[in-house]
DNA sequence: TTGTATGCGTTATCAG
DNA sequence: CTGATAACGCATACAA
């Protein structure tokens, strides 16, 4: 049993060196049970001088716990999610937990495979950002043996906690921002009414505007990309009836709209204000467009919090908890800097 | 030994059900050694009917191999790196390897801690994007027990492979692009000559331009952010001596420069062309600025390739390999669409 | 407080 | 080809 310098020393090596049993060495190093000061010191010295490091694999096998959490993300939204990855990672670190990351294709089977494979690794919990609704239902069922929390969307399951976005509140935030700045009519660009999520957003825009006296109309659908914004803006200009505000599906659409309006000499935000409902580059600090930013860092933190809590509580009384977070309104140069003073207020 | 439905079945359960020894069950499931067709079928049936899944923790302990690799990223560059994370993850998946992710602070001790902690988890290899040069030297020494590959920067170590960027080639690409489009003078904005990396880039700009008859001058340093670009452009305009081309440290600086030039009525790219040396939002397809994009996906792939290869070769004859990748020139609206026809060419 | 012995779930060695 | 058994490295029940 020569001490090969390239092999990691084991607890047995430490114990031998310290002249104690492995049990004692273990107890000193884990702090699980009281050990006399004398042996305590001997073990620590031995450990240090050998450069001992606990083998977490063996430890995991024994403890039936890996101190590891799996994070499953949809592949095709990667850049949005880097903030989420980082916050989850940071928050896990605070709990001495490791993060194993996995991407899922927009495909049910692969998604479930992913979770199963994470379970094979005996992760202590899973955070999943569901790529689609029906896909994940079964995946999450599959993971019933460990706590799961969903983040980013709500999926109809009563076996897992979830943290999502309060989209209606987000919409109201944006509409109020525009109304405060004098907008009396909104045109929505880049929304597809036949897609449930978009339909819901349009609906929310409408209901938020109504009490404020803001009318809403959806522009004919164009794709939610730069070119879509350009086409929509051109059509709007040709029709000749510009609204006081344009709300776009995301930043790219808004960029397109903005470019066309300015090129054609329309003052933005002077005569028309433009805003986006989805910030596409959360890492950047480019305030050219007023937009709604998902609170990814907070969502990550919250997800970890739920997970750790669920793990601590054990599997009894598993009641699904839903946490809603409001997005952040990031004011930019495409809407007016400060509220317009209305005539009523002036006379007051 | 009641079969608790909530406990994962073990190999022993499968063996019992199939009426064979655990050894045989293991052989069937791993395919390590030949087993008679009859027993093979029995074991598979038993495994399937029990929903058996191999416990990779136990497997790892036995095999002294976790099929896991660690990825260490600097925290404060997160959004740039999401493309790297994804490509590394995807490529690892092809090799049935799991990714455990960790962020490092710009701080030597923490960086080393990170690697040690990964080693405690017995990862089979480590990919690290070094936050700073001297920091990582020791960290990488610490990881001598497993293969390490550095990605994104070259650190002077002859014990690890690395994949980096061919910055000089990148610079030449950009300068040629500008020269082809009629630029005869370049002003560099947002570079700090006292920072070695920036000094090197300026030098590269100069050497690339010289043979093409392009002169280079650095503008007085302003920070490499939007405001820095704005201030630099204003100063340039006040001096009254505009160059034919402006090369900025990154996209943000370029945005600032662009905004000021256009606001003050300077035609871009008509009279002045503007380019950036660092694409800040690789996820986006916004072609408003000509820029250089790091080939993150390719770098990730290459890093995994090196790692897997190193692991296969074992620790003998560890000669450090360096692979350099050229960045991609992404043409945008801030430089001319196609090369200018020079007088010589016209007369030819 | 300390030591002995056992098991976590797999895989590999060694006989048969 | 198959089976019994010994590790892998650690943590704990139990005995002292």
Image (cartoon, coloured by chain):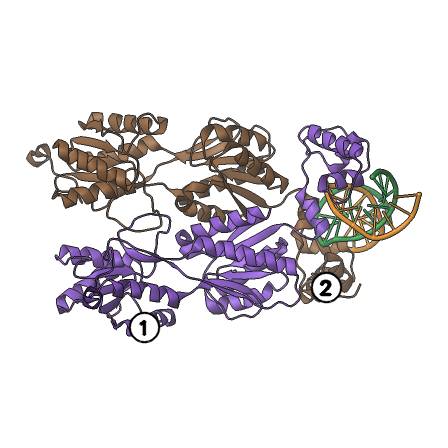
Chain colours: A purple, B brown, C green, D orange
* Chain of residue at mark 1: A
Foreground pick, A59 / A2: A59
Please indicate, yes or no, whether residue B34 appears anywhere in the rendered image: no
Is the residue B129 above or below the residue A212 in the image? above
Q: Position of residue B165 (x, y in %)?
A: 38, 35
Residue A264 visible in the picture: yes
Residue B33 vs residue B140, the one in the foreground: B140
Residue A267 is drawn in which quadrant? bottom left
Instruction: Work out which residue is located at the far left of the displayed protein and give it.
Output: B347
- For the C terminus of chain B, the image quarter is top left
Give the secondary structure at mark 2.
Answer: helix
Of B282 and A43, which appears nearest the observer?
Answer: A43
Callout 2 environment at 10 Å: few (<14), some (14 to 19), or many (20+)? Answer: some
Q: Give the number of callouts.
A: 2
In x, y percent, where is residue A302?
A: 51, 57
Q: Residue at x 17, y 63 (%)?
A: A234
Q: Is residue A279 left or right of residue A126?
A: left
Question: Residue A8 appears at what percent x and percent y?
Answer: 68, 34
Whether the residues at callouts 1 and 2 have beta carbons within 8 Å, the answer is no
Mark 2 highlights which residue? B42
Front tag of 1 and 2: 1
On the same chain: label 1 and label 2?
A: no
Q: Which residue is mark 1?
A: A193
């Amino acid at each position: 049993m020569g001490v090969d310098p390239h092999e990691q020393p084991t607890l047995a090596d430490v114990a031998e060196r310290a002249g104690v049993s492995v049990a004692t060495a273990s107890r000193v190093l884990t702090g699980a049970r009281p050990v006399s000061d004398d042996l305590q010191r001997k073990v620590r010295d031995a450990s240090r001088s050998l450069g001992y490091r606990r083998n977490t694999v063996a430890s995991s096998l024994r403890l039936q716990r890996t101190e590891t959490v799996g994070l499953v993300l949809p592949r095709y939204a990667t850049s949005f999610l880097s903030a989420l990855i980082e916050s989850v990672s940071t928050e896990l670190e605070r709990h001495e937990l490791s993060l194993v990351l996995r991407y899922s294709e927009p495909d049910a089977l692969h998604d479930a495979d992913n979770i199963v494979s994470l379970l094979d690794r005996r992760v202590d919990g899973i955070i999943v950002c569901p790529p689609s609704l029906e896909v994940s239902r079964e995946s999450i069922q599959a993971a019933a043996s460990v706590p799961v929390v969903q983040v980013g969307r709500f999926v109809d399951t009563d076996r897992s906690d979830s943290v999502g976005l309060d989209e209606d509140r987000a919409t109201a935030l944006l509409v109020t921002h525009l109304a405060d700045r004098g907008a009396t009519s909104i045109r929505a660009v880049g929304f597809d009414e036949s897609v449930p999520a978009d339909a819901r957003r349009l609906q929310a825009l409408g209901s938020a505007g109504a009490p404020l006296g803001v009318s809403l109309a959806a522009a004919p659908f164009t794709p939610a990309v730069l070119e879509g914004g350009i086409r929509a803006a051109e059509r709007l200009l040709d029709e000749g009836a510009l609204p006081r505000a344009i709300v776009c599906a995301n930043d790219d659409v808004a960029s397109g709209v903005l470019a066309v309006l300015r090129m054609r000499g329309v003052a933005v935000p002077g005569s028309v204000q433009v805003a986006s409902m989805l910030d596409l580059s959360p890492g950047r600090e480019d305030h050219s467009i007023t937009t709604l930013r998902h609170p990814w860092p907070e969502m990550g933190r919250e997800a970890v919090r739920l997970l750790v809590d669920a793990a601590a509580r054990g599997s009894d009384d598993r009641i699904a908890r839903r946490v809603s977070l409001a997005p952040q309104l990031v004011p930019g140069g495409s809407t007016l800097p400060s509220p317009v003073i209305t005539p009523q207020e002036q006379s007051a």
